[in-house]
Image (cartoon, rainbow, N blue to C red):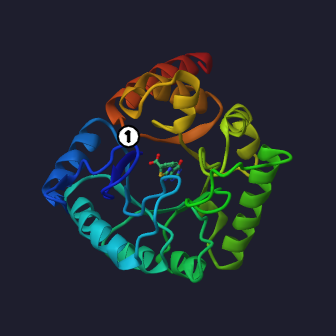
Amino acid sequence: MGVINTTPDSFADGGTLYRSERLDLDLAMTRARAMVEEGAAILDIGGESTRPGAAMVTVSQEMDRVLPLVERIAAELDVIVSVDTSSPRLMTEAAQLGAGMLNDVRALGRDGALAAAAATGLPVCLMHMRGEPVNMQQAPRYADVVAEVEEFLLLRISACEAAGIARQRLLLDPGFGFGKNLQHNLQLLNELPRLAEPGLPLLVGLSRKSMIEQLTGRPVADRLPASLALAVLAAERGAAIIRTHDVAATVDAVAMWTALKEMGST
Ligand code: 7PM
């Protein structure tokens, strides 16, 4: 899953799709096309900055950024378009324009999101987050982070089923960096197989995240080697989908793991 960020201020790829302070659709399409050629099966389009401490954007701002790109990618490229949003209105409109998947860092927790997602008929990724982006990194505490993330996700699966979203439509994500410190992130990665127990595919986003800075001291531009290592370690522990800013490199890295795994099963 390749990340296309339409916000002007993302920590990982901030404003790279902007020209004279406006989102450049053609540039975004060029980036999207390149990611598909590099082997992305899914493109995740986001318009809300979930950077720790980020300001909230209005829903209409988010829709203006995301919808035109969803429409063009769905029409022009052979790829599943995922929409990274918590907004019920955006879910509904994106589905009408050809989106193939919903990715919600709030696990359909906003008012109306369960019903809106249910009505689209699309697959949904449920992610765990503690708090909100504005406050999520203020000393997050857990007695047992893996158990608490698992419990939250199981509750959200139940809420989805009650709202008419079939279990087979769901994917799970521990939400690395979302209200977790370094120890929490490491524990979640190490014990990822426990989160696979519900039998749903796991989606994992570790690309360029700040846990890499904590372990290596590298600025965001220099976090690819560590991101690749984390992608392979996540695949080894059962991740089905890797969310990345660097599609070509990640496809190559995971291909090495796949080759070895396939040899083991022959
Ligand atoms: C801090 C944390 C800053 C995360 C920016 C981010 C995920 C996601 C994002 C993820 C799913 C980023 C992000 N991360 N959706 N959206 N899983 N499902 O690194 O890990 O782009 S935003």
**Residue at the image point whose x is 60% and y is 63% from the top:** 132
Question: x and y percent of residue 21 in the render?
Answer: 19, 60
Which residue in the structure is indicated by mark 1? 245
Residue 253 % position (x, y): 44, 23
User: Which residue is nearer to you in this view: 229 or 194?
Assistant: 229
Q: Is residue 176 above or below residue 104?
A: above
Location of residue 125 by image quarter: bottom right
Tell me if residue 171 comes above or below residue 203 in the rendering: below
What amino acid is labelled 1 in the image?
His
The residue lying at 53 percent from left, 52 percent from top is 52
* Label 1 crowd bin: few (<14), some (14–19), many (20+), radius 10 Å: many
211 vs 131, left or right, is left
Q: Nearer the viewer, residue 205 or 116?
A: 205
Q: Position of residue 8 (x, y in %)?
A: 30, 57
Q: Residue at x 40, y 76 (%)?
A: 58
In the image, the residue with mark 1 has its CB under 8 Å from the nearest atom of ligand 1: yes
> Image check: 213 left or right of 62?
right
Work out whether residue 179 or residue 166 is closer to the camera in this orientation and state it. Answer: 179
